C-alpha cells in the first residue's frame, strides 16, 4: 500500500457495484445515489476530474451519461485520509 496527495490525483472513475479501497476502515460503495430518482435510474459510471485545490479541499467536475430528462445533482467526493480525517494523503489506487 502506498499513499498519494489527494490534490495530485488528476481524475477518479467510480463504478456502480464496486467498492472503495480502504486502509483503515471497511470498504464502501464507490457510488451512493440518494433521492427518489435513484429507484428509476442510477449511473453505471461517473468520471470526476480534478479542477484544482489544496490539501483535502479539491474541486471536482463529475460527468456521466444520463437520459436527456435527467441531470446530476449534488456530487460529494470523499476520500479516507491516510492517517485519519483531514490528512491530505489518501490510499493510492
Image (cartoon, grey):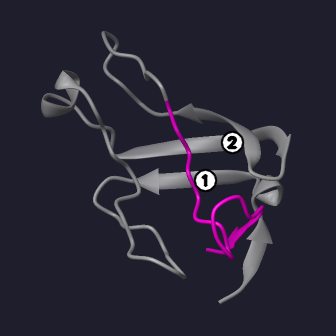
Q: How many marks?
A: 2
The question of residue 80 being in magenta is answered with: yes
Local packing at callout 1 (Cα closer than 10 Å; few below 14, some 14-19, many 20+) is some
| Range of residues picked out in magenta | 75-93
Residue ID at (68%, 74%)? 82
Residue position for label 1: 12
x, y (%) of residue 44?
Answer: 33, 46
User: In this picture, is 39 found above or below 70?
Assistant: below
x, y (%) of residue 31?
Answer: 37, 49
> Which quarter of the figure is the C terminus placed in?
bottom right
x, y (%) of residue 69?
Answer: 30, 9
Q: Is residue 19 left or right of residue 22?
A: left
Secondary structure type for disc 1: strand
Secondary structure type for disc 2: strand
Q: Is residue 55 left or right of residue 13?
A: right
x, y (%) of residue 26?
Answer: 38, 76
Whether residues under marks 2 and 1 lie with C-beta atoms below 8 angstroms apart, the answer is no
Residue ID at (17%, 23%)? 36
Taking depth in this image into account, of 56 and 77 the one nearest to the observer is: 56
Q: Earlier in the sequence, mark 2 or mark 1?
A: 1
Marking on residue 79:
none
Marking on residue 49:
2
Amino acid at each position: 500500500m502506498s499513499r498519494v496527495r489527494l490534490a495530485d490525483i488528476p481524475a477518479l472513475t467510480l463504478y456502480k457495484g464496486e467498492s472503495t479501497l480502504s486502509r483503515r476502515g471497511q470498504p464502501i460503495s464507490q457510488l451512493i445515489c440518494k433521492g427518489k430518482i435513484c429507484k428509476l435510474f442510477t449511473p453505471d459510471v461517473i468520471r470526476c476530474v480534478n479542477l484544482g485545490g489544496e490539501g483535502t479541499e479539491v474541486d471536482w467536475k463529475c460527468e456521466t451519461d444520463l437520459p436527456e430528462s435527467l441531470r446530476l445533482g449534488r456530487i460529494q467526493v470523499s476520500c479516507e485520509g491516510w492517517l485519519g480525517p483531514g490528512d491530505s494523503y489518501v490510499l493510492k489506487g
